[in-house]
């Protein structure tokens, strides 16, 4: 509905054979008066130099807006990264407490297992696969 270009109703368009012609004439006059008030209101808003037109995305519910979905995905990614760091920190603390300091130098290999490391006695150690 475009309030800057309202539809005005002409009482002369009412034919003589229409039922309730006086009621229709009264309704047309009230609708025209309302359209005039709305037109003045929206024209005033439109001419205001500080007025910024609303974009379609502002009207959409928040969960359907692209920026909301991007922020939500980024927050979830950060949360998972923090949880992973906390898990790794706890695992490293556990290894230190249990005396497995030599296992802290292992890094995951590209094939999913762990790299072979040498301890101080030149003995080969393998860490278990996940």
Image (cartoon, grey):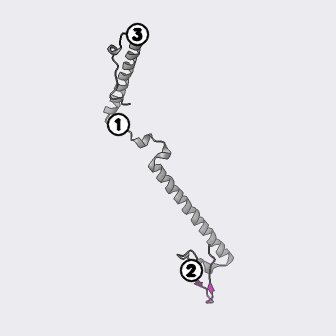
User: In which image quadrant can residue 116 be found?
Assistant: bottom right
Dominant SS of magenta comes to loop
What number is the disc on residue 51?
Answer: 1
Q: Is residue 95 left or right of residue 41?
A: right
Structural crowding at the residue carrying mark 3, measured as other residues with C-alpha within 10 Å and reported as few (<14), some (14–19) or many (≥20): few
The alpha-carbon separation of the residues under discs 3 and 2 comes to: 94 Å
| Residue found 40% across the figure and 10% down from its top | 22
Q: Magenta includes 25?
A: no
Q: Residue at x 43, y 11 (%)?
A: 20
Circle 1 packing at 10 Å, graded few (<14), some (14-19), many (20+), is few
Counting from the top left corner in percent of width and height, residue 66 is at: 45, 49
Give the percent coordinates (x, y) of residue 63.
50, 46
Picture layout, residue 35 above or below residue 16: below
Instruction: Judge from the rendering whether residue 97 lies leftward or rightward of residue 14; answer left or right.
Output: right
Helix, strand or loop at mark 1: loop
Cα separation between marks 2 and 1? 64 Å
Boundaries of the magenta span: 117-128
**Residue 125 drawn at (x, y percent):** 62, 83
Give the residue at mark 2.
115
Residue 13 figure quarter = top left
């Amino acid at each position: 509905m475009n309030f800057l270009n309202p539809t005005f109703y002409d009482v002369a368009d009412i034919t003589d054979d229409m039922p309730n012609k006086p009621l229709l004439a009264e309704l047309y006059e009230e609708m025209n008066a309302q359209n005039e008030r709305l037109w003045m209101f929206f024209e005033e808003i439109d001419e205001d130099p500080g007025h910024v037109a609303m974009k379609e995305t502002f009207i959409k519910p928040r969960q359907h807006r692209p920026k909301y979905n991007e922020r939500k995905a980024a927050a979830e990614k950060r949360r998972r990264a923090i949880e992973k760091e906390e898990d790794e920190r706890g695992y490293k603390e556990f290894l230190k407490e249990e005396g497995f300091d030599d296992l802290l130098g292992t890094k995951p290999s590209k094939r999913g297992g762990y790299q072979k490391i040498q301890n101080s006695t030149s003995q080969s150690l393998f860490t278990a696969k996940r």
